[in-house]
Image (cartoon, rainbow, N blue to C red):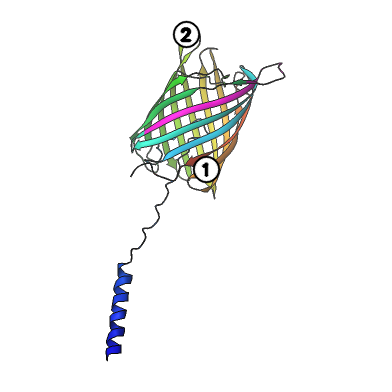
Amino acid sequence: MRAWLATLLLATVARAAFAQTAVPPPPTEIPAANPGRPTVSTPATLTPVGYLQLENGILVGHRSEAFATLFDINQVTKLTVHPRLELIAQFEPVAWSEGEGESRYTNYAGGISAGAQVLLYSGQGAKPSIAVSFLQSAYAGDAPDLDIGSSQQSVIALFSFDFGEFHVDTNAMFNSQVADSRKAQYGQTLSISHPLKHTSLTCELWHFTQPADEARADGVLWALSFGPNNHLIYDVGFDVGLTTTSTHWEIFGGFTYLVPHRLWK
């Protein structure tokens, strides 16, 4: 009888101990990155709140009015601090350029810009998300410009929506450029992407005025994006100029990485 009671008591204590054992919480799901590269267009939607997103790339340009060959490294850091507010910093740490008739490359320091993007309306499906952004140049640098030039200030209207299986990003850009005098530049972009299993194929048309030359630059861009998970996305692609004052061609590659640790709760 005593053995039976002891066995019953032991089983009850073991069951209670097992019930009180702390069950580890399920791992936090890492949100998906929201790449702004490699297209000229930027999505109207913002990155996940509280997560640092890093967009890093290299670009090689061939034959433009400012250079024969250009190689540059570019970086964009984004941090969304509120569901409707994203902070942006753009860097071009270094560039190498070869001029027409030259046989060696020259090193340059690129520019630095900072600004923010505000989500005005969060759409879904065919209903577009609408945002506006502002960028201010903090340091112009001395690297040669691509065909679209560089801006002191930029105001961009951004629209993103889905059309069936296609995703569309389109921007209208209003830039202030400084050459001999301050001049206004206007640009439009239309980027259409389509998922292909674990990759995404993108085609983009873009147009910018060139106020310093009283000309225009147009081009078409193709890019392929892929990644091992939703917070690390690689990209490669090329761009072809369509006017005589456009950079003849560019090739590029890079990656977008959403740091998988939220900076605050």
What kind of residue is marked 1? Ile
Q: Nearer the viewer, residue 101 or 225?
A: 101
Give amino acid for label 2.
Ser
Identify the residue at image location x=59%, y=38%: 236
Viewer-proximal residue among 188 and 2: 2
Residue 205 rendering spot, x and y as whole percentages: 53, 30
As for residue 91 lying within the magenta part, the answer is yes
Mark 1 is surrounded, within 10 Å at the Cα level, by few (under 14), some (14 to 19) or many (20 or more) other residues, namely: many
Residue at 38% across, 30% down: 117
The dot on residue 181 is: 2
Tell me which segment is drawn in magenta.
86-106
Where residue 175 sits: x, y (%)? 44, 19
The residue singled out by tag 1 in the image is 233
Q: Is residue 42 visible?
A: no
**Count of number-bearing discs:** 2
Please tell me which residue is depicted at 31% across the width and 80% down the height of the picture: 10
Q: Considering the numbered disc 1 on the image, is that residue within a helix, a strand or a loop? A: strand
Residue 220 vertical placement versus 142 (above, below)? below
Residue 174 falls inside the magenta stretch: no
Magenta stretch, main secondary structure, is strand
Residue 4 located left or right of residue 99? left
